[in-house]
Image (cartoon, rainbow, N blue to C red):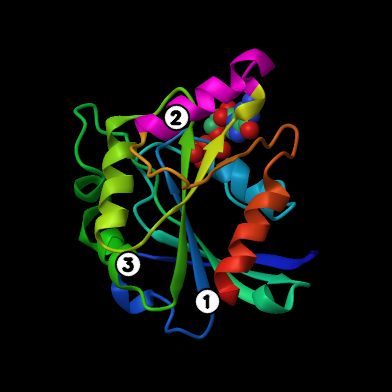
């Protein structure tokens, strides 16, 4: 599958600016520093599209990118970059950090077909766990990606990924997609999962 184009459309700071259903939406979320901008750039084969390491706590908007691909199912869609969480020193719930705007986007946006939630193996936080539980409770089963897997030694990889799965409280059988922007591992797998979601 080829990425034909990817462009930043806008930052939505109020619900009126959310897309109106003209295209499918796929959102990407995760705590700050989990590797979200890197993953978005890797997925789209772009270097500086999503800014890597932007100022913590600054972005509280829903950032929309319009993507065109060679796959008929995903010919055109919005990739939605949600604000990172985990900036607060005292661990607030992610919903408190995101605020009502982002929460309502995730819970109610009709054309949102998937929330891709990034976690870092070995560094699963309480907020990650709460986010998974909250998404499950509102019926938005997240697509979960374990980032930076190139940092794992081969000898610890299987055990660490299993532990991450357990730490997140995921049900047996729910997949965790290992991803590395360094090796490119996981890119085809994640695109495959997203394509399948469009078909169902
Ligand atoms: P964000 O805050 O979630 O957008 O995270 P960034 O994309 O800015 O990444 C945070 C840090 O992790 C940066 O120093 C990245 O270079 C690094 N990083 C991101 N993805 C990977 C990965 O797959 N492997 C390794 N080794 N480092 C990564």
Instruction: Kindly identify which residue carries mark 3.
Output: 105
- C-beta proximity under 8 Å, tags 2 and 3: no
Say if 90 sits above or below 117 in the image: above
Residue 52 percent coordinates (x, y): 57, 39
User: Dot 2 lies on which element?
Assistant: helix
Q: Is mark 2 within 8 Å of ligand 1?
A: no
Say if 161 sits above or below 63 in the image: above
Residue 166 percent coordinates (x, y): 38, 31
User: Which tag is nearer the camera, tag 2 or tag 1?
Assistant: 2
- The residue sitting at 52% across, 76% down in the picture is 24
Q: Is mark 1 within 8 Å of ligand 1?
A: no
Q: Quadrant of the C terminus?
A: bottom right
> Does the magenta portion include 53?
no
Main SS of the magenta part reads helix
Residue 29 percent coordinates (x, y): 43, 50
Which contiguous range is marked in magenta? 151-167
In this picture, residue 192 sits left or right of residue 104: right
Measure the alpha-carbon separation of dots 2 and 3.
27 Å
User: Which tag is nearer the camera, tag 2 or tag 3?
Assistant: 2
Instruction: Kindly identify which residue carries mark 1.
Output: 24
How crowded pointer 3 is (Cα within 10 Å; few <14, some 14-19, many 20+) is rated as: some
For this rendering, which residue is in front, 184 or 11?
184
- The residue sitting at 33% across, 37% down in the picture is 169
For this rendering, which residue is in front, 101 or 1?
1
Instruction: Kindly identify which residue carries mark 2.
Output: 164
Q: Quadrant of ligand 1?
A: top right
In this picture, residue 123 sits left or right of residue 147: left
How crowded pointer 1 is (Cα within 10 Å; few <14, some 14-19, many 20+) is rated as: some
């Amino acid at each position: 599958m080829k990425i034909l184009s990817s462009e930043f459309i806008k930052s939505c700071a109020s619900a009126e600016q959310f897309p109106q259903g003209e295209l499918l939406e796929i959102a990407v979320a995760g705590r700050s520093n989990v590797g979200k901008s890197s993953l978005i750039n890797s997925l789209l084969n772009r270097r500086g599209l999503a800014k890597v390491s932007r100022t913590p706590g600054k972005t509280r908007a829903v950032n929309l990118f319009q993507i065109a691909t060679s796959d008929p199912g995903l010919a055109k869609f919005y990739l939605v970059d949600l604000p990172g969480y985990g900036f607060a020193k005292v661990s607030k719930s992610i919903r408190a950090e995101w605020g009502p705007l982002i929460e309502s986007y995730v819970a109610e946006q009709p054309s949102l077909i998937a929330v891709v939630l990034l976690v870092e193996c070995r560094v699963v936080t309480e907020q990650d766990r709460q986010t998974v539980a909250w998404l499950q409770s509102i019926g938005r089963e997240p697509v979960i990606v374990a980032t930076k897997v190139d940092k794992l030694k081969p000898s610890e990889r299987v055990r660490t990924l299993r532990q991450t799965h357990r730490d997140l409280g995921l049900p047996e059988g729910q997949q965790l997609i290992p991803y590395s922007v360094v090796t490119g591992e996981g890119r085809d797998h994640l695109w495959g999962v997203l394509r399948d979601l469009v078909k169902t």
